[in-house]
Image (cartoon, helix red, strand yellow):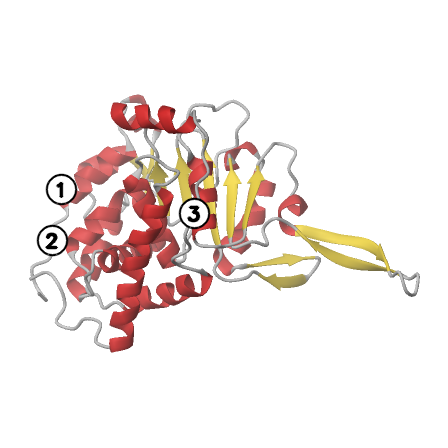
Amino acid sequence: MDHPISTLESPDDIALADKMNNGRKAILAELHKRIIGQHDVMELILQTLFVGGNSLIIGVPGLAKTLLIQTLAQVVDLKFNRIQFTPDLMPSDITGTDIIQEDAATGRRQMVFAPGPIFANIVLADEINRTPPKTQAALLEAMQEHRVTIQGRTYTLEEPFYVFATQNPIELEGTYPLPEAQLDRFMFHIVVEHPPEEEELEVVRSTTRVIDAQYERPVNGADLVAFQRLVRRVPVADSVLRYALNLVRTSRPKSPNAPEQVKKWVAFGCSVRAAQYLVLGAKARALTQGRYHVSFDDIKAVAHPVMRHRVLVNFRAESEGVTTDSIIDDLLARVPVPTSGM
């Protein structure tokens, strides 16, 4: 068997795991009242919620990326803010700033902090690569520390806190690629594809008539915080941990175990954060499938969304049409699954 001897043993943890799994099913049902198809995308977004991470969503216009996150916020009853990233957006437009305000009683003027749109539970950074790096960096502290510092004062963001960022892959003019340090802070790189023909037909049918969806709220913010803590309590066998780490280490061209394809086509491989998110994503996936332990298949299932924005290909790979996903496919085929510690 490919799991550790121990699993979740506390009755409270098992009850919470059942609540999480039932909540996942209920959230998916509510989302499908408005969103047609995109089941795999929804699963990854829910895993992001259950882990407490942030995710980057890539897709051409018209695939309901914004609508999906907006609907999700309604279903889980969290405060939602959308920030449209543009070339003239300033860091203070995201974080907020101090303004002069007059006290009506005393007539005195004083500096008062006016919070920016980052002060929400779910923040959608729409077309994040349309703003310069200085403004993109305004998100870094919030994504990593769940706080922002303005004028030397630190403000803590309300939990739970998530950033979902979107990018359009076909418009490159006037964009600013995200720095590697910021890309690494996203748990998943989620690719949204065009739906199959029948689903696309249903999208056209449903969106060209009156829509008045009423949503149940099966999960709230306090539940999500509890789920995040539960995910971290899921046990993982050393062999599964080692497998996740081996995938990450062999993605680095300077690693002695890196295959020739990696040495030939990869400029930079995955950071240690990739291994952390492989394990956390696998834990969340296991729980959402009703299991209280992590398998090798859980690691494999989240490998592409965790690694695709952390494996940076070189010019030779780009010129030969080698994609990051194909390199990850090769790593999954080459890195052996440990047989000890089972």
The residue at 17%/38% (across/down) is: 330
Q: Is residue 274 visible?
A: no
Q: Residues within 10 Å of mark 3 (few under 14, many from 20)?
A: many
Q: Front-most of 60 and 209?
A: 209
Q: Amino acid at mark 3?
A: Leu
Please tell me how crowded label 2 is: few (under 14), some (14-19), or many (20+) other residues with Cα within 10 Å.
some
Marker disc for residue 72:
3
- Front label number (3 vs 2): 3
Q: Which mark is residue 333?
A: 1
Q: Position of residue 73 (x, y in %)?
A: 47, 49
On the image, the x and y values in percent for residue 75 come to: 43, 50
127 vs 196, nearest the viewer:
196
Q: CA distance from mark 3 to mark 1?
A: 35 Å
Q: Amino acid at mark 1?
A: Ala
In the rendered image, the quadrant that contains the N terminus is bottom left
- Camera-side residue: 259 or 103? 103
Q: Which circle marks residue 247 in the picture?
A: none
- Res. 30 in view: yes
Q: Residue at x 40, y 58 (%)?
A: 52
Between tags 3 and 1, which lies in front?
A: 3
Tell me which numbered mark, 3 or 2, is placed earlier along the sequence: 3
Q: CA distance from mark 1 to mark 2?
A: 10 Å
Occupied quadrant, residue 15: bottom left
Element marked by disc 1: helix
User: Helix or strand or loop: what does disc 3 sit on?
Assistant: helix
Q: Position of residue 139 (x, y in %)?
A: 55, 49
Q: Which mark is residue 337?
A: 2
